[in-house]
């Protein structure tokens, strides 16, 4: 599988700095872009493992990522200019622009060196925000395809997240995951319409 990294940020210093750090460690294509709109046309890519570093400010059109994820293994890391590290929307992870070079290299290595596109965590570790989103949708009875569509990720990514969730929690059944989600307030039972579950 071919590998690519896209660094999309309006600040040249950040793009060039990341490029310089990553190019020393990784011997595959690293593309720098100034704007998200420059990504249009990438939906034709197929069979790639792609890591995106995206500036978190001003991201509006996520359709291109939804299309790219259908035929490629994709991880999207948001580059935040402040301390808000909440993983929302299309982002699989978010990190501040002042993250150390060694930590950035580790994030890239984790993605490209593992068979699965999501970073494999150790059992007993806390679920990531994205994993909680997947768990919530699993507990509400959604199929992998519906979860993928709702979160704008591939079915393969959903399966990988579910595998990580079961490894971390040590719970394999959907009913067990549902009980865990209720007990740990991942889902609010008062907001669930019972007819939606039938």
Image (tube, helix red, strand yellow):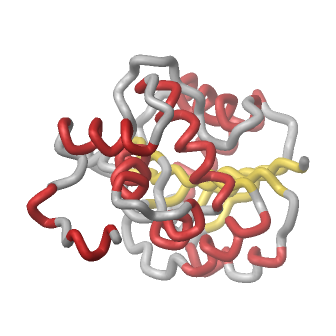
> Can residue 21 be seen from the camera position used here?
no
Using the image as rendered, state which of residue 54 and residue 155 is in the foreground: 155
Which residue is the extreme one toward the front? 198
The residue sitting at 21% across, 44% down in the picture is 182
How far across and down, in percent of the image, does residue 139 sit?
36, 52
The answer to whether residue 120 is left or right of residue 138 is: right
The answer to whether residue 51 is left or right of residue 8 is: right
The residue sitting at 76% across, 82% down in the picture is 41
The residue sitting at 18% across, 37% down in the picture is 183
Using the image as rendered, state which of residue 8 and residue 129 is in the foreground: 129
Looking at the image, is 69 positioned above or below residue 136? Answer: below
How far across and down, in percent of the image, does residue 53 sit?
57, 53
Looking at the image, is 118 positioned above or below residue 35? Answer: above
Using the image as rendered, state which of residue 24 and residue 158 is in the foreground: 158
Looking at the image, is 163 positioned above or below residue 4? Answer: above
For the image, the number of numbered tags is 0
The residue sitting at 75% across, 77% down in the picture is 43
Splitting the image into 4 quarters, where does residue 26 fall?
top right
How far across and down, in percent of the image, does residue 49 sit?
78, 51
Which residue is the extreme one toward the left? 190
How far across and down, in percent of the image, does residue 54 sit?
52, 59
> Can residue 192 be seen from the camera position used here?
yes
Q: Quadrant of the C terminus?
A: bottom left
Looking at the image, is 97 positioned above or below residue 198? Answer: above
The answer to whether residue 138 is left or right of residue 49 is: left
């Amino acid at each position: 599988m071919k590998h690519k990294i896209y660094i999309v940020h309006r600040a040249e210093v950040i793009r060039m700095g990341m490029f310089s750090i990553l190019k020393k460690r990784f011997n595959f294509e690293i593309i720098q872009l100034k704007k998200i709109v420059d990504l249009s046309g990438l939906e034709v890519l197929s069979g790639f493992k792609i890591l995106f570093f995206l500036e978190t400010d001003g991201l509006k059109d996520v359709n291109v990522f939804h299309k790219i994820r259908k035929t490629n293994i994709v991880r999207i890391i948001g580059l935040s200019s402040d301390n808000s590290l909440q993983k929302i929307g299309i982002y699989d992870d978010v990190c501040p622009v002042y993250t150390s070079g060694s930590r950035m290299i580790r994030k890239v290595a984790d993605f490209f060196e593992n068979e699965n596109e999501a970073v494999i965590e150790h059992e007993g570790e806390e679920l990531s925000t994205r994993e909680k989103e997947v768990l919530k949708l699993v507990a509400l009875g959604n199929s992998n395809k519906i979860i993928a569509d709702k979160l704008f990720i591939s079915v393969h990514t959903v399966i990988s997240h579910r595998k990580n969730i079961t490894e971390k929690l040590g719970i394999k059944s959907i009913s067990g995951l549902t009980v865990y989600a209720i007990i740990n307030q991942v889902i609010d039972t008062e907001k669930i319409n019972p007819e939606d579950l039938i």
